[in-house]
Amino acid sequence: MWSGVIIGVYMVSLLFLFLFSLGQLHLAWIYSRKKKSFAPVPAPTGFEPVVTIQLPVYNERYVVARLLNAVCALDYPREKLEIQILDDSTDDTTAIILELLQHLRAKQLDIKLLHRETRTGYKAGALDVGFQSARGEFIAIFDADFVPDAGFLKSTLPYFQHPRVGVVQTRWDHLNRNQSWLTRLQAFGLDAHFTIEQSARQAAGSFINFNGTCGIWRKACIADAGGWQSDTLTEDLDLSYRAQLRGWQFEYLDSVKTPGELPVEMSAIKSQQYRWNKGGAETARKMLTKVWAAGLPFVKKWHATFHLLNSTLFFFLLLAALLSVPVLFIKATYPGLRPLFHLGSIFLIGFFSIAWFYWLSTRQHPLQFIRLFPGFLIMSMGLALHNALAVVEGWVGRQTPFVRTPKWGQAETAEPIASKGGKIRVTPLTLLEGALAIYFVWGVVLGFQLRDWGLLFFHVMLALGFGFVFFLSLKPVRYA
């Protein structure tokens, strides 16, 4: 009986991974065919509407000055620019901002500090407070770890000349891409998301998302979609879907890059991944039925579904991983079931689909793919437990606070994080990740003992992944 249950759940997990990979394969195919037709540049005009810049800030002492200096250097008429600092800080960040404002206001800029004593609604709540008083027809948003180029507004605003364009999203670039292996691996994954996923979804007419920062909203679009809501941790994804279901168009600009700072320690990566993955599950729970109830083409619904279920991938990856070791015993005990597992080899298509997806994003630099793809895959597998737990919390509706990602103001520096207050925390989850590394080493040994090589590669990657994440979780202080 238990063998049947294990096999059934294992196959369902593999099926989900396979279907998800088909969606990624389709996006890669769209990108490879239509890569020259993305987001045509509008003809230059004198289109200069009033713009509000929103800067949500929470305890950002190390980066807030860099952010404010960059925003105040934007090439745009001063009388048509409003800057809102949406400050929920509880440390000395507010004092730093007040000191900076004494100098910045001398530049005849309209800068407002909106400080809240309580973080009601977290980032979504802060954005909504600013929205209520914003005088701009368009609202640009930058998180504290990003540094917009001076030409940002003039590169993006022309796309809003079409009255149904509600959002223009730019590509993230990375200030500290080469600081460490951790930052290189993160940059590798994010580059593929922007280069392939965002570009291909737009080319196919599918839903894309505002990435929470480095983009501009039409104020009327936010209002029409119901405004910022704080019932998910990914308020950006939530509002993106509500707006597009209302018929608003989104433009993604791959050619306009806005650099930001990548997390430099595993604990910070986990904080960010927790928010993204739990919020993704919360948004899927909220929006999936609305997507399927809408009068959209099937392919558009398909891509929207797996876009919303992106984080749920980790839940099924973890299930398949945990069950893959007992599957070795079942195969050895019941030889008659071997044809069923041979049928499962079709899911190798999924692996090669994902490999091609990431190859396309780096094919101009093939050595980069060879160096980084295995490491990225290993790190992703090692984060499966952490991210799967976040997904479960999202699906069951457990409420948790918005946890900010620590930023250190580093850009290709070799300064150790500990000198700026880094701490080592060993949690039960970290210990469990170490135990899973041992579990999958046992899976490798078992494969050799049973002379079953079908899952050997999978188990090696899992053992390396959980070992990698466990080790870096114990040693968060990293040098470039």
Image (cartoon, helix red, strand yellow):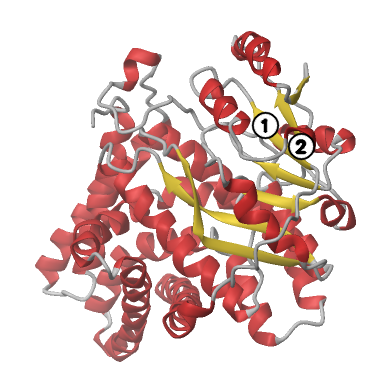
* Whether residue 8 is visible: yes
SS under mark 2: helix
Query: Is 162 located above or below residue 478 in the figure?
Result: below
Q: Quadrant of residue 69?
A: top right
**For mark 2, does the 10 Å Cα neighbourhood hold few (<14), some (14 to 19), or many (20 or more) residues?**
many
SS under mark 1: strand
Where residue 215 appears, as percent x and y from the top left, is: 64, 50
Which is nearer the eye, 24 or 161? 161
N-terminal of the pair, mark 1 or mark 2, is 1
Q: Quadrant of residue 76?
A: top right
On the image, numbered disc 1 is attached to which residue? Answer: 56
Distance of label 1 from label 2 (alpha carbons): 7 Å
Query: Is 183 located above or below residue 57 in the figure?
Result: below
Query: Is 88 located above or below residue 5 in the figure?
Result: above
- Find residue 127 and name its label: 2
Where residue 192 appears, as percent x and y from the top left, is: 41, 62
* Whether residue 395 is visible: no
- Find residue 403 and name its label: none
Where residue 407 appears, as percent x and y from the top left, is: 47, 28
Residue under the image location 37 percent in, 26 percent down? 426
Q: Is residue 31 left or right of residue 359?
A: right
